[in-house]
Amino acid sequence: MDRASRPEGNVTDIQEGWDVYDADEEKVGNVDRVEQGYVVAHKGIFFPKDLYIPTSAIERIEHDRVYLHVAKGDADAEGWDAPPTAGAASGGPPPKPDAVGTPGLTGTAEEGGRPVRASGGDTTASAGRGVGAAAGNAAVPLETTGTTAGAAPRSAGPVGTTDGDQALHLHEEELRVSKERVQAGQVRLGKEVVEEERTLDVPTTREEVVIERTPSDRQPDDHTIEDSADETIRVPVAEERVTVEKVPVVTEEVSLGKRQITETRQVSDTVRREEARIDQTGDVDVAGAATPGWDAAAARFRTTWEQGSGAQGGRWEDVEPGYRYGWQMANDPRYRGRSWADAEPALREDWASAHPETPWERAGAAIREAWDSVTARA
């Protein structure tokens, strides 16, 4: 789609966290927020750099992605390191910065706490404003904190911030698990012939000749000896003979199939995250400085506790105050650089005063563990 015909209404669909890609479909960064006329994207991980991309540079928006019409290597040359002016946001060229000035700055004596010079535009100021006049487009030093004609007063502060606030974005790596189906093995069901010797007891029957002799009363007989000399009696004798025959029979049926087994497997890896480290010089109070850092530290301590002492029973809520106290004291400027042996007496006394309901003997292990965790990274 041509940029001139691209519907601007699609820009309102962009959500925080969407990926930003260049004309070659290489990732440039992630969307941080959407402003009037431009989109703020983060570039990099450990050293974030905001890119203020005008909506005119967006080629298309699809599948939760924002595509630009410029290549990734040319993004830095587009002057997107500061919020674009109204002309740049609508498609016009961005203002070119002065050698020491700031793009679009024409009315403030200081920007970010340093003197600057205005570049481009009308450099002639009216009388009584303390601004020297120069011909043409020469740079003019601004010596006052007034405003140019028709411009609203602006307070001095860092470029791209509101009321002097500055933001540092912290990142962390998280584990994302995906599954793929692979062949784990194969089962083959077949048959093979196995020989074995078997012995059977088979009862058989056979006939046996029995001779019985009975004495006679010696009566005379009509037959002579010569007549009965060849007389013979034949008696057949039978027996059962065993014949072995092998007949195949079905003894068992074996089938092969599959079923789904669901089991839980643990995967682990080492991830990194960024934590804010606040260095204070002098007696400076930083309101709310401890809470974000503790939230991240508490998650680590709880995981370690649950895998160790927590596995034997107990509640995290009962030991959390000790971990929090040890972490806070290790980050307290009063104890910074001191060893545990040196700081323990004062910590023990302070704990007894602030937490009389929990004796040191019961909380000391958690306090020491949190203390060592902080001081080991210092």
Image (cartoon, rainbow, N blue to C red):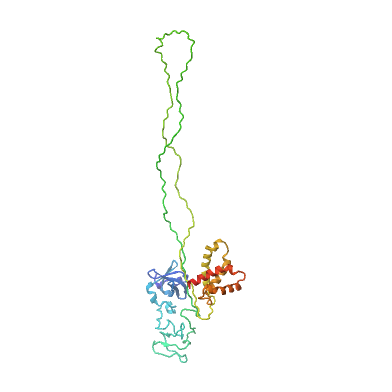
Question: Is 70 situated above or below 96?
Answer: above
- Measured from the top left, where is residue 78 in percent x and y? 39, 76
- Measured from the top left, where is residue 26 in percent x and y? 39, 69
Front residue of 278/251: it is 278
Whether residue 7 appears in this view of the structure is: no
**Residue 60 location, quadrant:** bottom left
Front residue of 93/53: it is 53
Outermost bottom residue: 127
**Residue 243 location, quadrant:** top left
**Quarter of the image that includes the N terminus:** bottom left
Front residue of 332/288: it is 332
Outermost front residue: 341
- Measured from the top left, where is residue 209 in percent x and y? 45, 21
Instruction: Determine whether, in the image, residue 141 is placed left or right of residue 296.
Output: left
- Measured from the top left, where is residue 269 in percent x and y? 45, 63
| Total tally of numbered discs in the picture | 0
Front residue of 23/295: it is 295
Whether residue 368 appears in this view of the structure is: yes
